[in-house]
Image (spheres, rainbow, N blue to C red):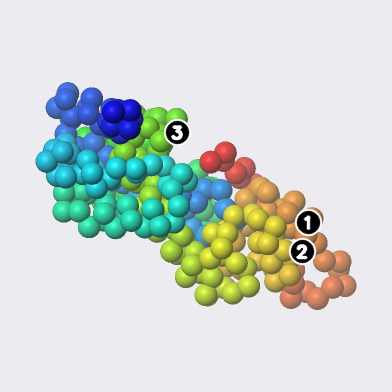
Amino acid sequence: MAAATKYWNRLGFERELWQQGTTLVAGVDEAGCGPLAGPVVAAAVLFPCSWLEAGLFSKLRGLNDSKQLDEDQREKFYNIIVNHPEIRHAIAVIDVEMIDRINIRQAAWRGMNQALDQLNPKPQHVLVDGLKIKWLPYAQTALVQGDGKSYSIAAASVLAKVTRDRLMQDYDKQYPGYGFAEHKGYGTPKHLAAINAQGPCLIHRKSFAPFRPIMETLELFPAPDANPASTNLEVSPSAQQLPGT
């Protein structure tokens, strides 16, 4: 009984809107704001208000914030969500070049906007993890730690996380030696050691404020008489701070 109550509580925001006649409710989330490398990925998911009739009660039991699931669980839920005929979903990828150009928060907002705009039908209301999205042309409700409170947001977090992890596995083959398949671009000791040994590659986010002190600490700015070929890292003087996500 307690498990069933918890399950229904995670549909509480959706059900309240459904009961008010707002039947097209989407959850949106992103993955990849914190890493030093790789894109940020956003996803949007719109569940049918005929939740029970669609057989989703049992299929999605256990769905949670992607960070609370292991890889096998994320893959299982990913496949259910993208293949179910009554679930609408969309995914947007914002590359490193755009992140460096407009900053990570703006890039995440852009990705979430793009994912929502791809949904068909368009949502009437959006449940957002964390802060409200600026310039969003839809009614929205921002939920702190929303991926643990709303199944729609949790589903979006799973799609975004799985998509980004797969991209980083591909980048691991394209840029060997950094360990992208293992750490997914986060600033782990192994990743920092690889940057020190090889220098940054094309998918490193050179606009991040932590990038300059990290690079200085790792001595990627050699003395003037060192090999000029290793000095091609440029960090924007207007580097953006990493968000707390």
- Against 206, is 55 above or below? above
Residue most toward the front? 1
Q: Nearer the viewer, mark 1 or mark 3?
A: 3
- Name the residue located 56 percent from the left edge and 63 percent from the top edge: 182
Asked if labels 3 and 1 touch by Cβ distance under 8 angstroms, the answer is no
Asked if labels 1 and 2 touch by Cβ distance under 8 angstroms, the answer is yes
Residue at mark 2 to residue at mark 1: CA–CA distance: 6 Å
SS category of the residue bearing label 2: loop
x, y percent for residue 230: 74, 72
The answer to whether 162 appears left or right of 205 in the picture is left
Three-letter residue code for mark 1: Glu
- Against 178, is 100 above or below? above
Q: Determine the image quadrant of residue 54.
A: top left
The answer to whether 186 appears left or right of 155 in the picture is right
- Name the residue located 52 percent from the left edge and 75 percent from the top edge: 173
x, y percent for residue 201: 61, 68
Question: Residue 216: which disc?
Answer: 1
Residue at mark 2 to residue at mark 3: CA–CA distance: 37 Å
- Against 19, is 134 above or below? below
SS category of the residue bearing label 3: loop
Q: Earlier in the sequence, mark 1 or mark 3?
A: 3
Residue bearing the label numbered 3: 145
Three-letter residue code for mark 2: Leu
x, y percent for residue 130: 45, 34
Q: Nearer the viewer, residue 64 or 3?
A: 3
- Name the residue located 11 percent from the left edge and 41 percent from the top edge: 53
How crowded pointer 1 is (Cα within 10 Å; few <14, some 14-19, many 20+) is rated as few
Residue bearing the label numbered 2: 220
x, y percent for residue 22: 18, 30
Q: Determine the image quadrant of residue 17.
A: top left
Residue at mark 1 to residue at mark 3: CA–CA distance: 34 Å
